[in-house]
Image (cartoon, rainbow, N blue to C red):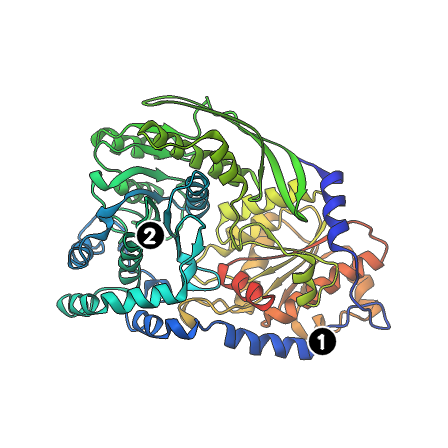
Amino acid sequence: MRFPNLFAAQFLAQTSRRRAPRCSNGGSNPSLEMFLGWKQFFATCREEPEELKDFSAYLDSLTNYEKSGVPKDAGTDSDDGLDLGRMRRLMTRLGDPQSKFKVVHIAGTKGKGSTAAFVSNILRAQGYSVGCYTSPHIMSIRERMTVGKSGDPVASKSLNCLFHKIKGQLDEAVQLENGLLTHFEILTATAFALFAEEKSDIAVIEAGLGGARDATNILSSSELAASVITTICEEHLDALGGSLESIAMAKAGIIKHGVPTVLGGPFLPHIEQIIRDRTSLMYSPVVSASDAGTRSSIKGLSMLDCRPCQVNDLVIQAQGDLQLSLELSDVHLQMLGEHQLQNAVTAACTILCLRNQGWQVSDKSIMSGLENTHLLGRSQFLSSKEADALGLHGTTILVDGAHTKESANSLMDTIQMAFPDAELAFIVAMARDKNHVAFAKEILSARRLAAVFLTEAEIAGGKSRTTSAEWLRDQWLQACKEVGIKSVQDIVPEEHHQMCSSAMRESMESSTHLVAEKSLAVAVQAAGGILGRRTSAGKKRPGVVVITGSLHAVSSVLRSVQ
């Protein structure tokens, strides 16, 4: 779907008031002082507030699989899977706080964070006090726990007070479990305790990995309002059994006896059957957001508070185990793309399940909650002020934490929908344990790809998971070879720093630059410079800088513009 002129013209008018200063030969004038300033800023802004020092230090003393990588088959329901028994014992020691409220439990490869945000905001729009637990975070660990009717991240003071209140029980549990309790298990238990202390009416809980053996999966049928499975894709294969089928079985582990299951999808037929077989075994009624009765669509794009949004119609007519219906027109989503519309529909189906159980949620609240949902680092366009902070005056900048083939495909669809004629410059930093070639192929499908800067960002897990810019470049060259792309200029950093020369500009104006650049800050400046030079060379198409590949890279950029 394309909306080339109206939306692009409106958005570019907001972001192109001023242009970057030019050097005498027509190129951009990147500042080394700015690069050094970024490096220093990144080093300091990663730190949590002083009030959370004790809590952060406590978490850092525990095994953190987000940093070290999850052991093979740890997420499977097998002898090699993580031990849920220790998590249950920990919750018992804390007084089983998860029993104090109802829970919507969400698993899935992609889309579970967005779906959790949609569900939470709909319930808050109705006036409920909602606890929402998601991972990972972008700026602060407090983002993982939003509370109350406002949906703000938990206050540092509140989290610190709670930690010291339950620290004795945590210490006893860690000792009794021989130090095996993990960073995620303690954090999850803390979230449940927080939501109970805040007297939440309901909690929306995102599974961390898989579902069956995830620390969040200690909920009984009586504590659960609905289980949601968004998508099934090939990610974390080693930890989840090595196949798409084993991933589906792991995710289906959150389905509980007699509790409704909402399916997002769409799924491959045999994968959906695996999930449905589990629902049949558990006598769980099923509502599918991908049924034929769902006829939702994107009508167009517009501007809302100087930010892009998409206008959608939602029509849900569920005719399966539960008879549910909803019809909303002109829903303005700040979350862009067909995949986010699907997440919104999945969230709406979840709310309809709750409404069927007696929860009072109006259509107006559903619409308001959907429209007021946005997440950092998910199809996020930076404001003109934020672009200025990066030194890219008047540049359109999109940040998105896509890091799989599927999420890259969704990102490209969103860009094509919003800016079908734009010149694109990508900045990519990724963890080592991703399918880089498959990801690259999706990005290389762009119609007008001016440059790809392959760079580095601090990835959780340090050097063991960080991909060097040079190694990443080799993967992208392999992707170019496999898709038959020959018009790529493989540029070493020394050459890239000399791109202001007119001779080099002329030789590269019609090809895609592929550059390995270790410095994320340098890459950002150079990407803006390339787009600026192409514009000055007579190409009047809009230009968009896209920063993607990991939430860690996105986090570094967002922290720098605060």
Q: Secondary structure at mark 1?
A: loop
Q: Is residue 384 above or below residue 271?
A: below
Instruction: Tell me which amino acid carries mark 1.
Output: Ser
Residue at image coords 60%, 42%: 413
Residue 491 visible, this orientation = yes
Q: Quadrant of residue 168?
A: bottom left
Q: In this view of the protein, which residue sits in the foreground, 305 or 464?
A: 305
Residue at the disc numbered 2? 209
Q: Is residue 468 left or right of residue 385?
A: left
Q: Is residue 478 above or below residue 23?
A: above
Q: Is residue 370 left or right of residue 508?
A: left
Residue at image coords 59%, 53%: 481
Task: Tell me how many marks there are.
Answer: 2
Q: Position of residue 251 (x, y in %)?
A: 31, 43
Q: Position of residue 358 (x, y in %)?
A: 32, 29
Instruction: Tell me which amino acid carries mark 2.
Output: Leu
Residue at image coords 21%, 38%: 221
Q: Is residue 3 left or right of residue 124?
A: right
Q: In this view of the protein, which residue sits in the foreground, 210 or 55?
A: 55
Q: Quadrant of the N terminus?
A: top right
Mark 1 vs mark 2, CA separation in Å? 41 Å
Q: In this view of the protein, which residue sits in the foreground, 324 or 268?
A: 324
Q: Quadrant of residue 47?
A: bottom left
Q: Is residue 157 above or below residue 96?
A: below
Extreme residue toward the left, this view: 176
**Disc on the earlier residue, 1 or 2:** 1
Residue at image coords 60%, 43%: 414
Residue at the disc numbered 1? 31
Q: Secondary structure at mark 2?
A: loop
